[in-house]
């Protein structure tokens, strides 16, 4: 087939266009750092990158939920630590007031402190965290204990997903900590101690030594559970955070360009464009002279 002058010109122009597109693409990659900016650039890499991005987003969301849960667990653990101290103080009062040398007036004065401890314990049982009342089960919008020390929360559990199909319980049982569901009713035991002190009932005061100690151990056990759950939540959040970081790196490996090769390609594309431009000008010049 005879190569006409028009065919030479058309071929040169088409080559020039391809070189310009190559320069444009190389410029975009070098400036943005994105080797694959859309599905058509590399369908396989794009699909893999999207999968990594979805998994990373899910891991970050789970980590965020666990961080919020850990914050409330930390609040709950602190409240329980204070509650343990309340019961320890009550036991110390019972031990001191059980001594036969104490008179009725002294015991009545001690009863006032026990009443204050009971009210302090109520405040701790109604502690609030970021998600609401921490000892109310799933009923987090109202205080779990009434001014009369009655439990009106529930024993429902709240959980955070740490992986598809795997969850971690993130709340504590207020009933187990502060009611007979855990073995003792600390509010009732403090009330009984205060009454015994006011009535100068030595037997009742003596009995309170054991009941307040039992309440202290009960609260301490729940506090230990709080600490373990808190550590699990923090560990799970850290693992998920690291997973998200690795997925982000993997996505970058699929979609982003290495700087050195990207700028090398830009230079090569620019050089090729300049050469094709020179050739095109020559062809166009010759074509013009031929006419």
Image (cartoon, helix red, strand yellow):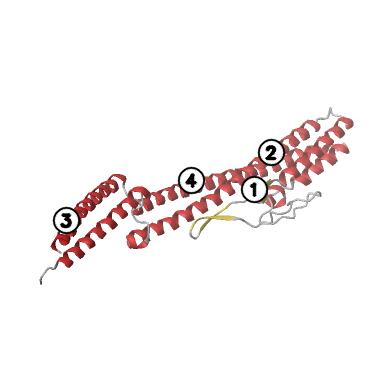
In front: 241, or 206? 241
Q: Give the SS element for disc 1.
A: loop
Q: Give the SS element for disc 4.
A: helix
Q: Earlier in the sequence, mark 4 or mark 1?
A: 1
* Mark 2 and mark 1 residues within 8 Å of each other at the beta carbon: no
The residue carrying mark 2 is 82
* Mark 3 and mark 1 residues within 8 Å of each other at the beta carbon: no
Q: Earlier in the sequence, mark 3 or mark 2?
A: 2
Left or right: 180 with respect to 9? right
Distance in Å between CA atoms under marks 4 and 2: 28 Å
Residue 237 image point, x, y percent: 50, 48
Badge 2: residue crowd in 10 Å (few <14, some 14–19, many ≥20)? some
Q: Earlier in the sequence, mark 2 or mark 1?
A: 2
Distance in Å between CA atoms under marks 4 and 1: 20 Å
Distance in Å between CA atoms under marks 2 and 1: 19 Å
Q: What is the number of the mark on residue 238?
A: 4
Residue name at image x 78 percent, y 51 percent: 146
The residue carrying mark 3 is 282
Asked if 6 appears above or below 19 in the picture, the reply is below
* Mark 3 and mark 4 residues within 8 Å of each other at the beta carbon: no
Residue name at image x 33 percent, y 60 percent: 41
Q: Earlier in the sequence, mark 3 or mark 4?
A: 4
Distance in Å between CA atoms under marks 3 and 2: 90 Å
Distance in Å between CA atoms under marks 3 and 4: 64 Å
Q: Give the SS element for disc 3.
A: helix
Residue 164 image point, x, y percent: 48, 59
Asked if 51 appears above or below 119 in the picture, the reply is below
């Amino acid at each position: 087939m005879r190569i006409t002058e028009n065919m030479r010109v058309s071929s040169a122009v088409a080559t020039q266009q391809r070189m310009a597109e190559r320069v444009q693409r190389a410029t975009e990659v070098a400036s943005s750092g994105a080797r694959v900016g859309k599905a058509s650039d590399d369908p396989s890499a794009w699909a893999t990158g999207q999968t990594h991005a979805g998994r990373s987003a899910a891991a970050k969301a789970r980590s965020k939920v666990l961080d919020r849960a850990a914050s409330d667990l930390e609040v709950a653990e602190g409240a329980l630590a204070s509650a343990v101290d309340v019961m320890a103080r009550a036991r110390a009062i019972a031990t001191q007031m059980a001594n036969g040398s104490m008179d009725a007036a002294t015991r009545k004065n001690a009863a006032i402190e026990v009443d204050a401890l009971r009210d302090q314990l109520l405040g701790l049982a109604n502690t609030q965290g970021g998600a609401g009342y921490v000892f109310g089960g799933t009923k987090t919008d109202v205080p779990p204990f009434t001014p009369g020390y009655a439990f009106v929360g529930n024993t429902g559990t709240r959980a955070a997903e740490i992986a598809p199909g795997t969850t971690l319980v993130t709340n504590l049982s207020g009933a187990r900590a502060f009611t007979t569901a855990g073995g003792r009713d600390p509010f009732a035991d403090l009330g009984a101690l205060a009454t015994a002190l006011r009535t100068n009932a030595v037997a009742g005061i003596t009995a309170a030594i054991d009941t307040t100690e039992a309440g202290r151990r009960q609260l301490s056990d729940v506090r230990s559970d709080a600490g373990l759950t808190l550590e699990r939540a923090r560990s799970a959040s850290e693992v998920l955070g690291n997973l998200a970081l690795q997925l982000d790196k993997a996505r970058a490996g699929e979609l982003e360009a290495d700087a050195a090769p990207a700028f090398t390609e830009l230079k090569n594309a620019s050089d090729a464009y300049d050469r094709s431009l020179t050739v095109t000008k020559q062809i166009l010049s010759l074509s013009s002279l031929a006419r």
